Image (spheres, helix red, strand yellow):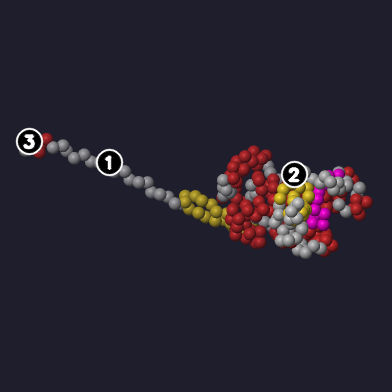
């Protein structure tokens, strides 16, 4: 009996109840993001740019070197891409940049047994045909210009420029954060996805109102007929050869823009982005607690 009385009384243990896990509630919103003139202009630019770039490389192949000023100094090019024979008789593709030579055999200068600055697969037409390359280039250049002028007129009249493209002061303050988010592949979600982010705005404004006019004007400067009517173009760009060099740099700036643009489309939601540029409607996901 004493033993029973000395036994400790059982103490009730505190039982912790786990908090219920609340799954986020996802809703979708259909937003009309791209108007018809924007979509038409965008899709017209796709074939124009590809053919302009490839036919431009065909034209470059006829004289694969760049200079500065009004005349070509063949002994001191800024850039040249040529086939060269070594002392052993072997042909190599040599790319020279500011006097420094690089072996680019198989890609630039010499590939598949042919001496060409850019290989056949990168040019339109694929065969060495300067006259046809110029015809393709000039036709699609004017189509590109007309499309650009019509788009610019629409963008200003509809206030697409001020409402959608020009970055605000708050946008500019968010540039560091936007760069960090893009490097971490974190793209805007929810209401932020309804509009262009600051990096998109800067890229589009720079291309539409900076790079595109620059490549058109330098292209016109290379024409003796245009120079006779507008001689001030030669003064602005420092000569016909300088204009050709700037034109070449602007071309590859477009190539860089296209690569980054396509990569971002694929990373941020390929089908959603393509659908919005075809139908105009963009699907925005909203996450919240139900």
| C-alpha separation, residue under disc 1 versus residue under disc 3 | 30 Å
| Residue at image point 82% right, 57% down | 62
Circle 2 — which element?
strand
Residue underneath mark 1? 14
Magenta-drawn segment: 60-69
Residues packed near mark 2 inside 10 Å, few (<14), some (14 to 19) or many (20 plus): few
Residue underneath mark 3? 2
The location of residue 274, given as percent across then percent down, is: 63, 59
Would you say 235 lies left or right of 107 here? right
- Residue 47, quarter of the rendered image: bottom right
Residues packed near mark 3 inside 10 Å, few (<14), some (14 to 19) or many (20 plus): few
Residue 180 makes an appearance in the image = yes
| Residue at image point 10% right, 38% down | 4
Note whether 238 is above or below 26 in the view shown. Answer: above
Of tags 3 and 2, which is closer to the observer?
2
Q: Which mark is residue 100?
A: 2
Report how many numbered discs are placed on residues in the image: 3
Location of the N terminus (image quadrant): top left
Circle 1 — which element?
loop
């Amino acid at each position: 009996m004493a033993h029973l009385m000395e036994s400790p009384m059982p103490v009730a243990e505190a039982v912790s109840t786990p908090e219920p896990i609340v799954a986020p509630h996802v809703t979708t919103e259909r937003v009309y993001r791209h108007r018809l003139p924007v979509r038409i202009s965008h899709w017209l630019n796709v074939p124009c740019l590809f053919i302009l770039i490839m036919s431009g490389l065909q034209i470059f192949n006829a004289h694969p070197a760049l200079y500065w000023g009004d005349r070509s100094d063949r002994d001191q090019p800024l850039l040249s891409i040529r086939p060269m024979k070594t002392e052993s008789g072997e042909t190599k593709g040599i790319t020279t940049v500011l006097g420094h030579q690089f072996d680019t055999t198989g890609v630039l200068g010499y590939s598949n047994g042919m001496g060409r600055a850019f290989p056949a697969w990168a040019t339109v037409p694929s065969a060495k045909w300067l006259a046809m390359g110029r015809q393709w280039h000039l036709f699609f250049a004017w189509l590109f210009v007309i499309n650009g002028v019509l788009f610019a007129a629409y963008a200003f009249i509809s206030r697409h420029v001020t409402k959608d493209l020009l970055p605000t002061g708050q946008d500019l303050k968010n540039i560091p954060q936007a760069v960090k988010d893009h490097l971490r592949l974190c793209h805007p979600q929810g209401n932020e996805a309804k509009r262009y982010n600051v990096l998109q705005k800067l890229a589009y404004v720079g291309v539409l109102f900076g790079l595109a006019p620059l490549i058109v004007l330098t292209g016109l400067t290379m024409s003796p007929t245009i120079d006779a009517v507008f001689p001030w173009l030669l003064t602005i760009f420092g000569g016909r050869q300088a204009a050709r060099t700037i034109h070449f740099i602007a071309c590859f700036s477009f190539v860089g823009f296209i690569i980054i643009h396509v990569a971002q489309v694929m990373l941020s939601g390929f089908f959603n982005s393509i659908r919005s540029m075809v139908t105009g409607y963009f699907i925005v996901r909203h996450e919240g607690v139900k």
